[in-house]
């Protein structure tokens, strides 16, 4: 196992916001010494999503199998999917998960009350309202479950920290802890996501206090994710994510195969 043992949040040209061939992403992972990766193309059905229904599982699956054969012995390639708002589209999500032998499903919340948290318009309100509304919806999503990993826990910070000037998760502890409790009770791992480190927010999601609360509450399951959409970002900042996981008092990384979790001690 390499120094960075996994990158479980990757996108390729099978997602609408990437132009990177799947094989090129695999080459980047091998060059950086990653031993296990997972592709999590966007599966979005929200009516407000401009590229809804973009994902085509059949050609993606065929290309994934080709890459698995081409990189056999060098790289373990897991089949994942990032399901947008799985609590709102549970029937469609479960039908997709039943159609292919996925290794894991990531659940993500991109839309709250019809607005996307990646657009400035979502933040045309007080910061407390914008963040609280997000975490309240996230509690509903994690209570419904049906997925294995929760993506980028406090993702509105990517844009919110820039527009509001600051972000302090302690202000929202009362609505964040119920989300963490749901994850612990339902066995949902946290995607320790580094994409916001590449933004002006310069934070992990979940941010460090949230990781500490999760560990204090008895949570154990975390995965590493660069959320890379280009080869240059594969594996990016995952050393920082590992350090934050250790600092929070967590002891394991979670690996998945055919939706079965396996906890592995953190690398030395």
Image: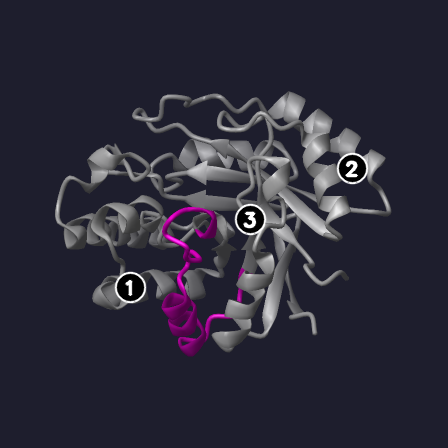
Q: What residue lies at 63% left-to-right and 34% top-to-bottom? A: 100
Residue 216 on image: x %, y %: 41, 78
Which label number is shown at residue 226?
3
Answer with left or right where residue 131 lies relative to residue 100.
left
Q: How is the image coloured?
A: one colour
Residues in magenta? 197-222
Answer with left or right where residue 4 lies relative to residue 154.
right
> Residue 154 is drawn in which quadrant?
bottom left
Q: What residue lies at 65% left-to-right and 70% top-to-bottom? A: 266
Decide which of 207, 198 is in the foreground and name it.
Answer: 198
> Residue 174 is drawn in which quadrant?
bottom left
Please identify the quadrant where the C terminus is shown: bottom right
Residue at the spot of label 2:
68
Local crowd at mark 3 within 10 Å, few (<14), some, or many (≥20)? many
Query: For residue 245: magenta?
Result: no
Q: How many marks?
A: 3
């Amino acid at each position: 196992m390499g120094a960075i043992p996994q990158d479980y949040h990757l996108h390729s040209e099978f997602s609408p916001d990437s132009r990177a061939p799947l094989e090129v992403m695999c080459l980047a992972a091998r060059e950086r010494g990653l031993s296990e990766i997972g592709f999590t193309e966007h599966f979005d059905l929200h009516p407000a999503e401009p590229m809804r229904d973009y994902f085509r599982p059949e050609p993606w699956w065929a290309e994934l199998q080709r890459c698995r054969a081409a990189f056999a012995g060098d790289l373990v390639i897991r089949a994942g999917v990032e399901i947008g708002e799985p609590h709102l589209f549970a029937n469609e999500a479960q039908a997709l998960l039943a159609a292919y032998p996925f290794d894991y499903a990531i659940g993500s919340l991109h839309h709250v009350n019809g607005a996307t948290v990646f657009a400035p318009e979502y933040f045309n309100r007080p910061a407390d309202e914008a963040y609280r509304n997000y975490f309240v919806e996230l509690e509903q999503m994690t209570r419904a479950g049906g997925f294995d990993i929760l993506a980028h826990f406090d993702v509105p910070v990517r844009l919110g920290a820039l527009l509001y000037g600051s972000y302090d998760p302690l202000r929202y502890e009362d609505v964040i802890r119920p989300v963490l409790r749901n994850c612990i009770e339902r066995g949902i791992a946290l995607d320790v996501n580094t994409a916001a480190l590449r933004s002006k927010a310069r934070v992990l999601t979940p941010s460090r206090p949230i990781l500490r609360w999760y560990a204090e509450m008895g949570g154990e399951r975390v995965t590493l994710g660069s959320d890379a959409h280009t080869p240059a970002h594969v594996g990016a900042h995952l050393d920082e994510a590992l350090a934050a996981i250790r600092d929070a008092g967590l002891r394991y990384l979670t690996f998945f195969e055919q939706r079965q979790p396996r906890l592995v001690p953190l690398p030395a």
